Image (cartoon, rainbow, N blue to C red):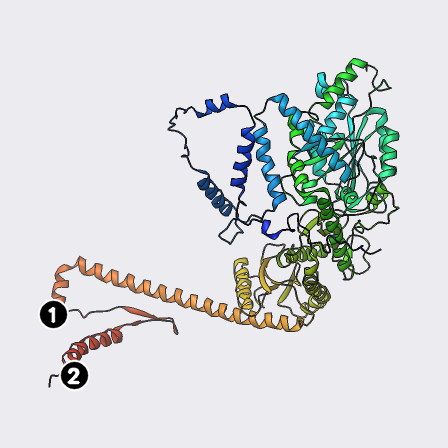
Amino acid sequence: MGDAPTSEMDSNKVSLGSENPSDVDRRPFGGLEFQVSEVVERLEAGVNAQDAMEEEKKPEERKISTGFFEPEKMDMDEILKVLEQLVLQTDPSCESLEPPLLPTDSVTRAAILSHSISALFSRLERSHAARLGTHIATETTRWMAHLFRLSDYDAFYHQEQLEGLVRVTRMLLHHKYPRYLEDGALAFSNRLPSIYSCVASPLGVVQHLCRQLGLPLACVRPVPVDSSGKGMDLNALDRLCEEDSAGRTPLLVLGEAGEPPLGGGSPLKALAELCGRRGVHLHVRGHALALPAAGGFEQTYSIADSLTLQPGPWFGIPGLPTVTFYKIPEPLTANDHSKVVNSASSREGALAALGGLTAGAARLAALPLWTATRAAGAKRLARRIDAAFRSARTARALIASTELRLLSDRPGGDEPPNMDIVDAISESSACVSFQFAPAGCADRPPPYYDKLNSWLGQVLQREADMINIEICETESYGVVLRYCPLEGIFLEEDRLSEWAAVLDAQLHVLTATVALREPFQKTLQTHPCLRLVHVPGWAGLGGVRYVPPGWENAPLEELNSLNRQLVETLRATDGAFSCGDGEDGMACVRFGMVTADTDVDELLDLVLSAGKDVEENSKALTDMTEVLKKGISAAQEELNRSAWQEGLLRRVPVVGRVVSWWAPPQPCPGRRLLLTHGTLQATDDIYRFVQKKDKEEPARAHSPTRQNTVP
């Protein structure tokens, strides 16, 4: 079913500030200084804090410290200039003279300003700030619940992405272990809590959860992947819960809906039914939870016990908090593994569980989202999410028309009107995951294809700036490329053909390299002086080491030097050659990616001819070295003889004076080394030539010329 045309937005060029181009401020800090100052002044005028203001106006005595640097007072313009300079200095890839900050629109500026307003609200009286924060959080929760079709939830707003999950798990610990408030970790020393997570899910989530709560990693119970390759195996989860019910406490199941890197998830209805039957808390996270805001769903759902939403990336607005919707668990009653539960301890545990989730500071954290929602409007935010899903569908259709292998489900957003909202979330994806693999490959491709996919991802990241491609490492499929418009830049429809051209060109290179790799290795075997070398992490044709006859037992340094010189010679012909190191650590010639018209025999002949030239030059250099060594040795012997004779004359000074009077010594300019023969020769001829030239110069200087004559 195709995408229905919309009158409000015909392409996925959706930006929350795109309606008015003049509204975009491209200055480094977007003129925020003036807006913050104006807002702060307006809010301060309504706050009755005159006494505190008078106290701040009193000058403070400046304490001079001789051991530490103390900055001088600066105005705001100078501080902003320093910040801009720091942004440039801390970005090694920045080549411009301006800080690499994105332009801000009106909604983004409103979200940024709300952080300053929130800091100002901290000066209010605590009870006043709590009432204000509760009102803001209540409105924001109502808006978000309506936008994402949720019902019967409370909400917690936080800046750290996993903080809400940590708070919910702490609430469950207080709920399941009523003496956790008094005994701490000793409360579950005899019955460890169990946290169930799919083996395909990021391990860092459960590790962070255990570190924050002081839980041992033994609490984590990995659940195998379903036979379909998507989501966790529910039968295996049921068996683990049955096993843990005897000696452990099943606590939490981490479910996924469109979670990276493959955008898959488990069937939420079946998962929720299992968790309800086993008495385990179900927490769901993933980008597919944004689907209800993009589709035309009228129904609401409340199937998970808690879930996490990410409005910041989904709306494309920085600085927005993460939202964790949760339900307060039912009061705990006595059961087989908790015989000491009473109403007082249960109530005390419930109060402790709610602590931190309903605090005033946590409620005030909703202010940026409240401000951005007011500035953009619910319809505009929904259009942005809808455009993200349409962009993912467009990219998937383009990739499906190529030789690439698709690994993710079809992105949602165009489901039929009568489809159940929970089924739509379970079956849809919010990203496009793909890879270059052999035709008909159903499992993980060979290891060489991991290198090819890494190369393809790096090329697309460098040459295709119209799309944000992420390189992911997965256990089931190896290296996978991923595009998720809910996390970054949209693929705009007017640049779709441009990206298609870049992708098609790289696919031709990949196909040609794979096709010529086997002929390259076979042809290499016909040349005894060329040896195939395995280069770790190299995606090209392969590595070759040049070992000419007679060099089999040569020192490693000389062989490495020979191959490095060979690479320098080849790079003057083609930049696809490069120097690398094989698994043995020795240098070799790396052959890069090739095209279909590449002649492998011609490439190897080029290497052979260049290798012979380098070998001859190396041999000539070796012979020259021997000549120099021989000449230096002869010169040293000559100097030693001269030194001995001079020493003898010094021992017989009378004879020396007689000889000097009778036969004065002739000047001996020295010796020269003739490189063609490697012999020492006297420099008399050079000395006579220099003397003759010195005599001719004065005569030439005094000879009359036409310019010196005077008429």
Of the pair 699 and 562, the residue shown nearer to us: 699
Q: Secondary structure at mark 2?
A: loop
Residue designated by label 1: 662
For the residues labelled 2 and 1, the Cα–Cα distance comes to: 46 Å
Residue 242 seen in render = no
Q: Is residue 361 above or below residue 104?
A: above
Of the pair 655 and 368, the residue shown nearer to us: 368
Tell me: 390 left or right of 592: right
Of the pair 385 and 194, the residue shown nearer to us: 385
Residue 408 horizontal/vertical position (percent): 78, 50
Is tag 2's residue or tag 1's residue first in the polypeptide sequence? 1
Q: Residue furthest bottom?
A: 711
Residue designated by label 2: 705
Residue 335 horizontal/vertical position (percent): 86, 19
Residue 90 horizontal/vertical position (percent): 51, 45
Tell me: 165 left or right of 100: right
* Amino acid type of the residue tagged 2 in the rendering: Thr
Tell me which residue sits at (39%, 66%) in the image.
628
